[in-house]
Image (spheres, rainbow, N blue to C red):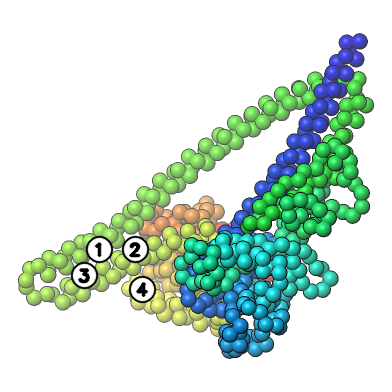
């Protein structure tokens, strides 16, 4: 009797929990879906308001300027579901012919305002980016000619706020894949925004707008169960009605009556730029079944309930203990990494302070000497002044190089390093760069040679390629101790191979595994200086160009740095994909 009583009580408790969990999961799906759609639409409105600023700050926005602005927004990646951004210019009947002539003069040979017919005013689409085949169909379309669009535009014009239209068929729709659509409008005025509706109508310049296809807009949404166990209908208006459906993810046929019976259906009002939408969330049969499986299992396994509960309790305790131990180990690991990071930071700050202070101190001393000569009132010693100015120039160049290294590291870390590829002959680039080092090589008494017997042409970024070569050659001169430095260029049909060989101090084998990392160097900074960033930057630039860099070296026998680059640019190093980097070698210091 006691066992039956415990089973009955447990069954009732589990059943109640099933219902509560089912409703909670469904409410979470409703909340997340509503919030996700609201945030997405708010983001589009904010983007259009920002685009209005482009027109408000300029009397005339050129077509190339608008194209560059929209391209910088990265619509396809940042604003999924949007079909484009356009500008519809307000026109009068008197200005229509001059407007069409002006647009044709700007390169739109077949431009016309359509549909034809006399109207009190027009609002013609003059810009729409990206200007693909679909969007090009909309150029010249008079939005005032269609009542649904006109109502939204009138509302935007009179309020000065974004306004959403009702359901429309976009003029871009062609073929069989026709979707319901709507548009968002933001008014643009001449000068500052007027304060009254009448003044706004008189001062209207046009509309920044964006067209949307409903399925494309909603498909990218992700909330629990969407299109798997939870369906979403979007209705235009304050009530759900079959004639007002903008979007529906429900499959045709029956299947949601049980959800209504169980209360798993919610209608949520949503305000979209002054227009009311109604969101209808409905649970599918699969959602209900997934929440009923525990109930059936509980009934079938009622006799094993106590044993199961004891097992679950012990397992939960074991999992909690294991989780606590794992969390403790992870905490210790993170603390160790944090301490190591602090040590690296302190070491870098110390080295950076020393490296930056050295040229600053020398620069200050030279300026003080020049100032004293000017204050003495005696004729200036031209030779001393020339030496002082030359010293100042060297120190400022060194400071500039140190700062450029830090900026390059920042750009690489944030992913803002852009490549400008162009056809180049590698041997010519190398010879030109080596000529810049002739004076440095002569001062160091180093023979610097280039071996490039055959042309090796490819697609590379000249600036970044010269930066790689500069780092390699300057390091060879710096650590070569006066020995000859050789630069060799070879090609094998698919890749270019660049080698820079010195016969200097070399690199220890244990340093070859770390020297391409940030702030790492194979020699003491006290003897050679530097921030330890040169080879890190070089490796990142080579990999950005689709290649890899390696080194062969022994202490006292010099070093050979080898750069291998695909001839056709990044992404073509190995059958169309970037070749994997070889194990790192010695650094540029």
CA gap between label 1 and label 3 equals 9 Å
Q: Secondary structure at mark 4?
A: helix
Earlier-in-chain disc, 1 versus 2 = 1
* Proximity of marks 3 and 4: CB atoms separated by less than 8 Å: no
In this rendering, is residue 319 above or below 271? above
| In this rendering, the label closer to the viewer, 3 or 4 | 3
Q: Secondary structure at mark 2?
A: helix
CA gap between label 3 and label 2 equals 17 Å
Pointer 1 residue: 363
* Proximity of marks 1 and 2: CB atoms separated by less than 8 Å: yes
Pointer 3 residue: 388
Instruction: Find residue 560 and report its horizontal and vertical position in percent.
Output: 52, 66
Pointer 4 residue: 440
CA gap between label 3 and label 4 equals 19 Å
Extreme-top residue of the structure: 1
Instruction: Find residue 95 and report its horizontal and vertical position in percent.
Output: 57, 84
Query: Badge 2: few (under 14), some or many (20 or more) residues near its Cα, within 10 Å?
Result: some
Q: Secondary structure at mark 1?
A: helix
Query: Badge 3: few (under 14), some or many (20 or more) residues near its Cα, within 10 Å?
Result: some
* Left or right relative to 372: residue 25: right
* Proximity of marks 1 and 4: CB atoms separated by less than 8 Å: no
CA gap between label 1 and label 2 equals 10 Å
Query: Badge 1: few (under 14), some or many (20 or more) residues near its Cα, within 10 Å?
Result: some
* Proximity of marks 1 and 3: CB atoms separated by less than 8 Å: no
Earlier-in-chain disc, 4 versus 2 = 2
The quarter in which the C terminus is drawn is bottom left
Pointer 2 residue: 399
Earlier-in-chain disc, 1 versus 3 = 1
Residue 456 in which image quadrant: bottom right
CA gap between label 4 and label 2 equals 18 Å
């Amino acid at each position: 009797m006691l066992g039956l009583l415990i089973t009955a009580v447990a069954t009732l408790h589990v059943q109640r929990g099933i219902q509560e969990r089912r409703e909670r999961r469904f409410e979470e799906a409703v909340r997340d879906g509503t919030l996700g759609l609201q945030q997405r639409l708010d983001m589009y409105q904010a983007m259009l308001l920002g685009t209005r600023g482009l027109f408000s700050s300029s009397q005339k926005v050129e077509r190339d300027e608008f194209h560059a602005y929209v391209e910088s927004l990265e619509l396809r990646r940042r604003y999924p579901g949007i079909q484009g951004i356009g500008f519809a210019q307000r026109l009068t009947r008197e200005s229509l012919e001059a407007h069409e002539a002006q647009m044709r003069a700007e390169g739109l040979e077949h431009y016309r305002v359509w549909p034809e017919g006399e109207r009190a005013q027009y609002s013609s689409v003059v810009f729409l980016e990206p200007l693909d085949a679909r969007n090009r169909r909309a150029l010249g379309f008079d939005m005032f000619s269609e009542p649904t669009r006109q109502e939204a535009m009138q509302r935007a014009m009179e309020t000065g706020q974004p306004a959403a239209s009702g359901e429309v068929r976009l003029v871009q729709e062609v073929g069989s894949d026709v979707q319901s659509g709507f548009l968002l409008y933001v008014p643009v005025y001449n000068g500052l925004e007027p304060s009254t509706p009448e003044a706004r109508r008189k001062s209207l310049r046009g509309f920044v707008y964006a067209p949307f296809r409903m399925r494309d807009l909603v498909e990218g949404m992700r909330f629990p169960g969407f299109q798997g166990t939870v369906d979403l209908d979007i209705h235009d208006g304050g009530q759900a009605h079959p004639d007002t459906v903008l979007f529906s993810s429900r499959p045709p046929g029956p299947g949601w009556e049980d959800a209504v019976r169980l209360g798993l259906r919610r209608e949520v009002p949503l305000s979209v730029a002054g227009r009311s939408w109604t969101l209808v969330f409905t649970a599918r049969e699969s959602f209900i079944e997934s929440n009923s499986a525990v109930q059936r299992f509980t009934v079938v396994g009622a006799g094993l309930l106590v044993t199961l509960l004891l097992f679950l309790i012990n397992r939960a305790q074991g999992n909690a203990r294991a989780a606590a131990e794992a969390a403790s180990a992870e905490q210790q690991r993170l603390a160790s990494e944090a301490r190591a990071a602090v040590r690296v930071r302190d070491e870098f700050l110390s080295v950076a302070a020393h490296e930056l202070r050295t040229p600053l101190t020398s620069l200050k001393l030279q300026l003080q000497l020049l100032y004293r000569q000017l204050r003495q009132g005696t004729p200036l010693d031209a030779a001393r002044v020339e030496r002082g100015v030359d010293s100042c120039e060297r120190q400022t160049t060194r400071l500039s190089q140190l700062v450029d290294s830090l900026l390059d590291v920042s750009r690489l870390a944030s992913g803002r390093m852009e490549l400008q590829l162009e056809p180049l002959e590698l041997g010519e680039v190398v010879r030109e760069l080596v000529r810049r080092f002739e004076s440095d090589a002569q001062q160091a008494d180093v023979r610097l040679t280039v071996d490039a017997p055959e042309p090796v042409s490819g697609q590379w970024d000249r600036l970044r390629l010269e930066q790689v070569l500069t780092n390699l050659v300057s390091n060879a001169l710096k650590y070569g101790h006066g020995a000859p430095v050789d630069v060799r260029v070879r090609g094998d049909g698919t890749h270019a191979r660049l080698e820079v060989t010195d016969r200097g101090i070399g690199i220890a084998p244990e340093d070859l595994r770390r020297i391409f990392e940030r702030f790492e160097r194979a020699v003491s900074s006290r003897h050679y200086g530097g921030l330890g960033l040169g080879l890190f930057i070089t490796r990142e630039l080579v990999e950005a160009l689709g290649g890899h860099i390696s080194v062969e070296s022994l202490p006292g026998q010099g070093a050979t740095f080898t750069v291998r680059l695909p001839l056709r640019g990044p992404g073509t190093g190995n059958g169309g994909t970037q070749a994997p980097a070889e194990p790192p070698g010695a650094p540029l210091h």
